[in-house]
Image (cartoon, coloured by chain):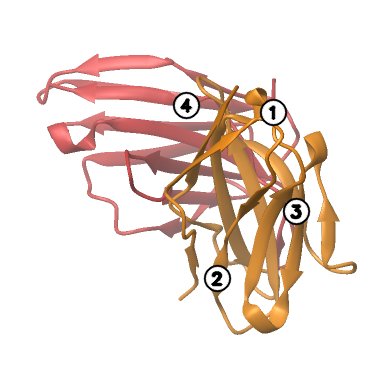
Chain colours: A orange, B red
Amino acid sequence: AQSVSQHNHHVILSEAASLELGCNYSYGGTVNLFWYVQYPGQHLQLLLKYFSGDPLVKGIKGFEAEFIKSKFSFNLRKPSVQWSDTAEYFCAVTSNSGNTPLVFGKGTRLSVIA
Amino acid sequence: ETGVTQTPRHLVMGMTNKKSLKCEQHLGHNAMYWYKQSAKKPLELMFVYNFKEQTENNSVPSRFSPECPNSSHLFLHLHTLQPEDSALYLCASSQVSGLAEGTQYFGPGTRLLVL
């Protein structure tokens, strides 16, 4: 069965600091990978996704993620965070070789302080 | 606005009540999902409907009963719930093409409190 691990439960950063949120998954086959974001009081939104091709994926609001197949990782990065990036971030994975459900990590809460 | 709407946004119910959650997607998708989001736990997939047919039931108790009358609407009927069922219930939709599942788009959720 697939599983997703997000190592950090809560990350606190100052504005302009660089961000990296870890995500590791366990699945032996070909995967589709996602990062979703949930801003306070808002619904889950897609931040970026990887299906195939360039393993460095760029998403909205300056976020990017790198798929490293050998490490089963899909870490999320942003060079300089803003206060408005305060939110909960969820990594998710599904197989692209079968009709398997999307599996989410527990989420990482990011607090950006001025 | 993601094109997925949910009503009601908030619901308080007693353990003996019967209520229903509604989800509607305006994206022309052919798959819909119910998730449960509890504090400090991963999003839990509850039910999946592809082309109106239930294809996944993730060991959900029978006090939760889904209904998908067409590809745009999804209901979750609730009866004799327990306080531990209090959570945010999220609906999502996606376009399933062949074997591959597309990106899921989420609604705002229904915040449920069971007293």
**Dot 3: element:** strand
Where does the image place residue A12, in percent across and percent down from the top left? Answer: 50, 38
**Residue B7 higher or lower than B70, as above or below:** above
Q: Nearer the viewer, residue A104 or A64?
A: A64
Quadrant assignment, res A85: top right
Where does the image place residue B11, in percent across and percent down from the top left? Answer: 31, 16
Q: Earlier in the sequence, mark 3 or mark 2?
A: 2
The C terminus of chain A: image quadrant: top right
Q: Earlier in the sequence, mark 2 or mark 1?
A: 2
Residue B65 appears left or right of B34: left
Where does the image place residue B25, in percent across and percent down from the top left? Answer: 64, 29
Query: Label 2 belongs to which residue?
Result: A25
**Dot 2: element:** strand
Q: How far apart, in angstroms, are the residues tagged by discs 2 and 1?
A: 28 Å
Residue B1 appears left or right of B66: right
Q: How far apart, in angstroms, are the residues tagged by discs 1 and 3?
A: 22 Å
Q: Residues within 10 Å of mark 4 (few under 14, many from 20)?
A: many
At 47% from the left edge and 64% from the top edge, which residue is drawn?
A: A5
- Amino acid carrying label 2: it is Tyr
Q: Nearer the viewer, residue B19 or A108?
A: A108
Q: How far apart, in angstroms, are the residues tagged by discs 3 and 2?
A: 14 Å
**Dot 4: element:** loop
Q: Nearer the viewer, residue B58 or A10?
A: A10
Query: Label 1 belongs to which residue?
Result: A82
Query: Label 3 belongs to which residue?
Result: A49
- Amino acid carrying label 1: it is Gln
At 56% from the left edge and 78% from the top edge, which residue is drawn?
A: A27
Q: How far apart, in angstroms, are the residues tagged by discs 4 and 3?
A: 22 Å
**Dot 1: element:** loop
Q: How far apart, in angstroms, are the residues tagged by discs 2 and 4?
A: 26 Å
Q: Are marks 2 and 4 on the same chain?
A: no
Q: Nearer the viewer, residue A36 or B21?
A: A36
